[in-house]
Image: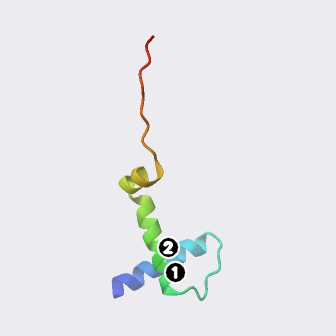
């Protein structure tokens, strides 16, 4: 529970540093931001979800 509270407070501070005032943002919303932040830092997730595979065809004619 302590780790979760620390993580939520960390996310809250990072969002506030962006200039967004979040005095009463529910913990569930902060947790969603935390999950999103983790996914966006996961290189495999980024490649699998946001980068479509490209087929390179060598056309020598």
Determine whether, in the image, residue 51 is placed left or right of residue 25: left
The mark total stands at 2
Residue holding disc 1: 29
Q: Quadrant of residue 5?
A: bottom left
CB within 8 Å, label 1 to label 2: yes
Residue shown at 41% from the left, 82% from the top: 6
Q: Is residue 43 above or below residue 6?
A: above
Q: Is residue 12 above or below residue 53?
A: below
Q: Residues within 10 Å of mark 2 (few under 14, many from 20)?
A: some
41 or 3, which lies in front? 41
Give how far across and how far down residue 18 sits, in percent.
61, 69
Asked if 13 appears above or below 42 in the picture, the reply is below
x, y percentage for residue 61? 45, 10
Left/right of residue 4 with respect to residue 33 in the rendered view: left
Q: Element type at marker 1? A: helix
As drawn, the residue found furthest toward the front would be 61
Q: CA distance from mark 1 to mark 2?
A: 6 Å
Q: Position of residue 58 (x, y in %)?
A: 41, 21
The residue shown at (42%, 25%) is 57
Q: Tell me the SS state at disc 2.
A: helix
Q: Which mark is residue 33?
A: 2
The numbered dot on residue 49 is none
Occupied quadrant, residue 3: bottom left
Furthest-top residue in this view: 61
Instruction: Check the image and report above or below for 48 versus 7.
Output: above
Q: Position of residue 42 (x, y in %)?
A: 38, 58
State which quarter of the image contains the N terminus. bottom left
Residue neighbourhood size for the residue with mark 1, other residues' Cα within 10 Å, grouped as few (<14), some (14–19), many (≥20): few
Q: Residue at x 48, y 84 (%)?
A: 28
């Amino acid at each position: 529970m302590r780790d979760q509270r620390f993580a939520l407070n960390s996310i809250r501070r990072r969002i506030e540093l962006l200039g967004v005032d979040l005095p009463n943002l529910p913990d569930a919303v902060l947790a969603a931001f935390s999950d999103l932040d983790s996914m966006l830092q996961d290189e495999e997730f980024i490649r699998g979800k946001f980068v479509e595979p490209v087929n390179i065809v060598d056309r020598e004619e």
